[in-house]
Amino acid sequence: MKIFVINGPNLDMLGLREPEIYGSDTLESINAELTDYCKTVGVKPSFFQSNHEGEIVDIIHSARGNADAIIINAGAYTHYSIAIRDAIAAVDLPCIEVHLSNVHKREEFRHHSVLSAVCTGVICGFGKKVYTLAVDALTL
Ligand code: DQA
């Protein structure tokens, strides 16, 4: 099984960015741990990070034919990007929306996701474990 793991804006700043909310691990180390985990369950991950909405749309499009599923943390775009929502709907692949933080415990503007309705499921609030939990959701 091939999975595209897509991280959106400001997730390249993990480790430095509000560590009390997002933890002290960098995206690089989270991806390295996820790579190790994927090996144990026979999954081949491909990692992408972009701060640009259109680039994320392009990456999602390229999943078609190149991946069996998508894991996406779209960062703040989660809450308002209809373009990313439409891209997820267009490729018609299993897609898990993840968030490191429990967005429902935070500011009201984070409570709504425009992506959830076109995703298979949503996992949030478990820190970096959300990525391995998403792999489990796709494979178990
Ligand atoms: C986030 C939650 C979003 O509200 C925020 O804009 C992010 C990160 C998370 O992983 O908890 O950038 O997606």
Image: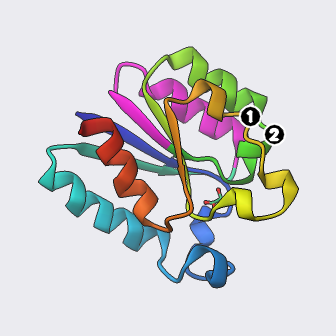
**Mark 1 → mark 2, Cα distance in angstroms:** 6 Å
Q: Residue at x 77, y 36 (%)?
A: 81
On the image, which quarter does residue 14 sit in? bottom right
Q: Amino acid at mark 2?
A: Tyr
Q: Which residue is mark 2?
A: 80
Q: Which residue is mark 1?
A: 114
Q: Residue at x 40, y 68 (%)?
A: 30
Q: Residue at x 65, y 76 (%)?
A: 21
On the image, which quarter does residue 107 sit in? bottom right
Q: Residue at x 65, y 27 (%)?
A: 117
Relative to residue 112, is residue 67 drawn left or right? left
Does the magenta segment cover residue 116? no
Q: Neighbour class for label 1 at 10 Å: few (<14), some, many (≥20)?
A: some
For the C terminus, the image quarter is: top left
Q: Amino acid at mark 1?
A: Val
Judged from this view, the residue extending furthest toward the front is 105
> Magenta stretch?
52-71
